[in-house]
Image (tube, rainbow, N blue to C red):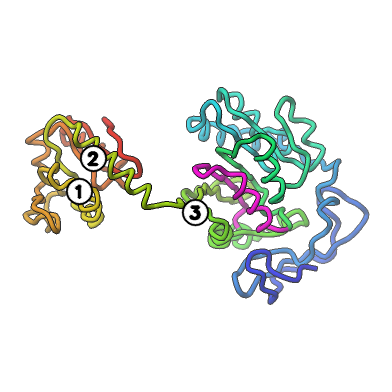
Amino acid sequence: MIRQCGLCGDDYFEEILNLGAQPLAENDNGKLYPLALVRCNFCNLIQLSWMPPQEEVFAEDHPYTTGNSRERQRHFADLARKLAPSLGAGDFVVDIGANDGTFLKALRDITIGVGFLGVEPTGKAGKSGDIPMLREFFTWKTGRDIVAQVDQKATVVTASNVLAHVPDPHNFMSGVEHLLADDGIFITENHDWNSVSRGAQIDTVYHEHLRYYTMASLTRLLDEHGLTVTGVEEIPAHGGSFRVTAMKEPQDLQQKADRIKDRLHGLLEAADGPVYGIGATTRATPLIHFTGIQDRLECVCEVAGSDKIGRNIPGTKIPVVDEKKLIEDQPPFALLLSWHIKDDIIPKIRLMGYKGTFIIPLPEPRITDG
């Protein structure tokens, strides 16, 4: 019987679904276990009321094989294609709950010089071919041991449809936290509780799925282990899931800010000719003042009709002008102060006729032709 919430530790639950006593869905051991869902009245996490022994749920002869599903093959091939461009020689990828290695095989086939390791407690690890496998349940100790054995932290850690199966999510995430490099990426896919409840997907309630996450509950878990969500994508897997990308919170934001300041200064000093800014946004003011680039900006161009036109950037003598001046003057460089919507602005400015080069200030200063 579950006596406390796996996320917040509270012990006050409300039963929201009872499917009676049932056998294990994949590994019938002749036993029946209570199958009911409870909601934590403090943090709203949904979880089973009863946890069978994990060694019986995920036994040696556990029958599920990822590679037998064409849908799963396509799904992981797509994920591999999205991830591959960010990987290079010397990087290290760990897939937790790797099953037969379907995902790592797909990633191996389209990358060069990348190291791989799967973590899988069942006998399906034996079907991974030449993909190295560690046969055990992933815990904080596993994360620590992997780093000690390979003398390297992971560039990417993936856990697809795994967190729902974990008896102690905090123990699991402590292992991920230790295993992941400071600039590494954690990718996790989870069945969305909203899809389960709104779609009456009662057939996805079985003893393997100990918990059902929402974005709110998953974000809380990640945050408690120093990970910040950097991307969310809805995916159709399992009747409605979400894929989350997370990274470690920078430990020294000041040091990072100072590096950005120096790099942006370097780019603007090397720029041969006048530099116009694009986007007199509120966020442009602190950036300009902190980096001290007032003397390098001739003006800041703003969309026609804006009430900011005719004023100066606060605390400076940089005039805010109509964006048509950028097209008329054709300065060689344009600093995109509205960098956070660059994918919308750059095509628009190009269509208007600007032929110069863009400078993107954040999160890492760089030059682009768009």
Relative side of 199 to 20, left or right: left
Q: Is residue 20 above or below residue 179?
A: below
Work out which residue is located at the far right of the displayed protein and give it: 30
Q: Pointer 2: what residue?
A: 265
Q: Is residue 194 magenta?
A: no
Q: Quadrant of residue 51?
A: bottom right
Q: Earlier in the sequence, mark 3 or mark 1?
A: 3
Q: Secondary structure at mark 1?
A: loop
* Depth order, front residue of 20/316: 316
Q: Is residue 173 magenta?
A: yes
- The magenta segment is 168-192
Q: Position of residue 246 (x, y in %)?
A: 52, 49
**Residue occupying image coordinates x 25% and y 47%:** 338
Residue 102 shows in the view: yes
Mark 3 or mark 1, which is nearer to you?
1
How many angstroms separate mark 3 from mark 1 (CA)? Answer: 29 Å
Q: Pointer 3: what residue?
A: 228
How many angstroms separate mark 1 from mark 2 (CA)? Answer: 8 Å
* Depth order, front residue of 145/243: 145
Q: Is residue 7 above or below residue 58?
A: below
